[in-house]
Image (cartoon, rainbow, N blue to C red):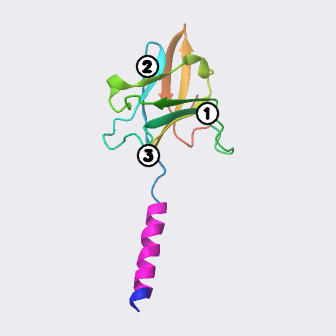
Amino acid sequence: MNKSVFLYVSIGLFISECAQPLSHKLNIDVKDNKLCIYTNNKNTYLSNDNYFTIFVGEYNPNEKFKSLYNKVYTNTKFPIEKNDCLTIPSYVFKKDKIYRINIETNKNLSVLVCVSKKKSILSFKIMKPEDSSCSN
């Protein structure tokens, strides 16, 4: 009897852990006319390998994520605070497309964003998964 109860409790805990969101919110700003990302989450930190990766891909909910840009950071201060944000070059982004930006470390943090350039000034708009275009 005790083994059955333990088994059911273990399975329940495993399922509830799997149901947790895979992604946490990533914050974004513009710095030196480049997108700049940071976590604003004190509970994020580097893995034991002391590295993290930034990925950018064009967002299409009907297709598997395909990275257009990625950069691995080793022995770099993790971008928790806004003043420690890490920039992504503007050439990565095309006008009127939705992009998913991810940081992977002990947590997966991401944001959907539409990037605009007007008179060479970069701006962005945070998007939702149900948004199908930048005009939403």
Q: Which residue is drawn at 47% across and 36% down?
A: 52
Q: Where is residue 15 in the image (x, y as percent from the top left)?
A: 48, 68
Q: Which three-letter amino acid code belongs to the residue tagged 1? A: Gly
- Residue occupied by mark 2: 30
Q: Is residue 7 above or below residue 31?
A: below
Q: Which residue sits at x=63%, y=21%?
A: 94
Which one is in front, 15 or 72? 72
* Callout 2 secondary element: strand
Mark 1 or mark 3: name the one nearer the start of the chain: 1
Residue at image coords 57%, 38%: 131
Query: Which range is magenta?
Result: 4-18
Provide residue 78's location: percent of width, then percent of height: 38, 32
Q: Earlier in the sequence, mark 1 or mark 2?
A: 2
Circle 1 packing at 10 Å, graded few (<14), some (14-19), many (20+), is some
Q: Check disc 3 and report its element: helix, strand or loop.
A: loop
Question: Label 1: which residue?
Answer: 57
Cα distance in 3D space between marks 1 and 3:
18 Å
What is the magenta segment's predominant secondary structure? Answer: helix
| Residue at far bottom of view | 1
Task: State which mark lies toward you, 2 or 3.
Answer: 3
Residue type, numbered disc 3: Lys
Q: Give, as a three-letter code, the residue at label 2.
A: Val
Image height check: is 33 above or below 41? Answer: above
Name the image quarter holding residue 85.
top left
Determine whether the residue tagged by mark 1 lies in a helix, strand or loop.
strand
CA gap, disc 2 and disc 3: 23 Å
Residue at which label 3 appears: 107
Q: Is residue 89 left or right of residue 66?
A: left
Q: Position of residue 86 (x, y in %)?
A: 43, 24
**Mark 2: few, some, or many residues within 10 Å (few <14, many ≥20)?**
some
Of the 4 image quadrants, the one containing the N terminus is: bottom left
Picture quarter with the C terminus: top right
